[in-house]
Image: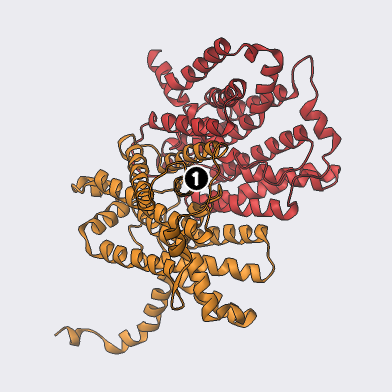
Chain colours: A orange, B red
Amino acid sequence: MTDSIINEPALRSRWPRVLGARLANLPISYLGTVALLLGAGLARPNLLQPFLLLLILRQAAPLGIAVIGQSLCIRMLSLDLSFGGIALVVSYILTSGLLRLPESELIALCLLFGVVVGAVNAFFITRLRASSVIVTLAMVLILGGIVTALSQYRAPGSAPPMLRYIGQARIGIFPVSVMVWIAALVPMAWFLRRSVFGRFVDAIGANPRAAWASGIPYIRTIYVGHILSSLFAVLSAFLIVGFVGFGSLSTGADLALNSLAAVILGGVTFGSGKGGVIGPAVAAFMLMFSFNLLTSFGLGEPGKEMAQGAIIALAAIAYAARGAAPAA
Amino acid sequence: MTRHKKRLFGRSGLGVIAIGLPAAMFLLLSLGTPDFFSARNIANVNSQITALLIVALGQLIVALIGGIDISVGSVISLTSVVLASLSASVAVPVALILAALVGLGNGLGVAVFGVHPLIMTLASMIFVQGFALLIMSAAGGTVPPLLIALAKTNIAGLPAGFFWCVSALAIVAVLLHKTAFGLRLFAIGANAQSAALSGVGVRAPRLACYMLCSLAGAIAGVYLTGRIASGDPTMGEPFGLNSVTAIALGGVQLSGGVGSVIGVVLGTITLGLISNGMNLVGVSPFFSAALTGLLLLGAVSLQRRKAIGI
């Protein structure tokens, strides 16, 4: 019955437009990665060797893991800029020798620390209704200030062997850290797509007031989101410390900003209630690949920063131009 | 009359914390540290907070319309390297034009394209910081002697910073409270939709706010560069966040529509006294960063908003 109603030739003539619209709605990271790979293929074919691509993937793993938490927060109309502070504390706990505990207990302590920071962030954001930007930035000031001051008395040392293994080892040609990334990414993608929690996240992101009025456990969802976000930041710091092999006061310094850039490139936007987990993950790879490509062109740190800023601005403008109302 | 007073008080954002905190700090430091009241230390505090006050005034203008600008720190750095690397005759105009362009970019992104101000200014912060490092990779260069004199010369026994502060305060106070533009900002910040429906143009004032904030950053950069007598590509780094902290401590609502010049002065003095007090007591300056963070948390927690989120 319905078949007869559909005008088939008209449908057929519409499909290029539908396909075009679908492509235009894809996260910028997909098209950007393809464009970068093609560009590299023409200008720097060496970068496309599987071995190098895996190396870049390994570089992207810590960022990719942090991005999972950041995208979760942004989907709930919140933001977590405290990654740098968390990474710094985790690096200090693991490498300073301040706490003479076995490796497994240090790792457990770091995870507990992540839960506490996430809960404190969420407490200020939900109960005291403070801006998530300010709360998480203040957290960076507090954590960073304490660790930097403590480092004057006891400098960070080398990383625990288990984390060094995870950060540096490979199974075959495949880096273990990339496996950790996939092991965090896939269940999280499935969980957000299938679970009731995932629906809550999307509902809150789409319209917080409507979500609140519908009886969705708004505050509990934001608590869980921020705690998960901090835990992903801790996991990310494990990989960074393991990869570098020792602690430093610059551990994870650009994690928050890069994760924000990756989330925007990955198609998760404030207040849309939309966004997946894969888009931002691809964006994490895209960012790392672009940094490597820029380095291969001889562009130093300043050039990279300029490119990074321009990428974030253009991606944000492109998404906003797709139909969001002007913000403040 | 009482109602009128109450309304005025409400729009200024001044409250117990904004007024009480600097007063308590002042009392604590004057009792606890003998050097606090020395003319040299007071002049020191004044010089330390001058740049922050100028930037915070710019931040206030943006916060009044419910925006935020974290790129001002990079604008300070850019100004510094431009002043230290160009000839004296063109350095200041070029620095101001560049700052205005950064503000224009921010304003276009936010007001025309609808990008969240935090994201837009974050992007420009990274871009401009990169640009500053591209011009000058490390501290150095020569600063025009006139600028050094403007930032360092004492007039009638008062440090130059004092005059910079008073001029900046006067300009912003007149702009906000004596002009139609200022009134529009309060209207837009309180409710942009209502303001637009009442015939208040929303886009142009927003653009202007971001440009003014960047210009405030440039002026702070001119002062700082003159004072240090050298260019520094990372000079402005702490100012983006510190200026937000200063206005939040001064009772300025980051959601817009509420704030005052006096509040900004009080917030800036609070921050200045914290670092000065820490110095006098001999505590690591890194702990003062942590304390600033704690104060920021406290200040924003007391500004309970309607909405949860960013």
**Of residues B149 and A183, the one drawn nearer to the viewer in this rendering:** A183
Q: Quadrant of the N terminus of chain B?
A: top left
**Of residues A138 and B8, the one drawn nearer to the viewer in this rendering:** A138
User: Furthest residue to the bottom?
Assistant: A9
Q: Which residue is mark 1?
A: A96
Going by the image, does A18 lie left or right of A51?
left
Q: Is residue A1 above or below residue B299?
A: below
Q: Which residue occupies 31% across, 62% down?
A: A188
Element on which disc 1 rests? loop
Q: Is residue A96 above or below residue B165?
A: below
Q: Is residue A1 above or below residue A30?
A: below
**Of residues B35 and A285, the one drawn nearer to the viewer in this rendering:** B35
- Residue A276 appears in the rendering: no
Q: Is residue B122 above or below residue A154?
A: below
- Residue A188 appears in the rendering: yes
Going by the image, does A309 lie left or right of B293?
right
Counting from the top left corner in percent of width and height, residue B275 is at 58, 27
Residue A195 picture quarter: bottom left
**Of residues B267 and B185, the one drawn nearer to the viewer in this rendering:** B267
Going by the image, does B232 lie left or right of A253?
right
Counting from the top left corner in percent of width and height, residue B266 is at 54, 22
All told, the count of numbered labels is 1
Going by the image, does A145 lie left or right of A119?
right
Type of the residue with mark 1: Ser
Neighbor class of circle 1 (other Cα within 10 Å; few <14, some 14-19, many 20+) is many
Q: Which residue occupies 67% across, 22% down?
A: B46
Counting from the top left corner in percent of width and height, residue B86 is at 82, 48
Q: Quadrant of the C terminus of chain B?
A: top left
Q: Chain of mark 1?
A: A
Counting from the top left corner in percent of width and height, residue A80 is at 42, 48
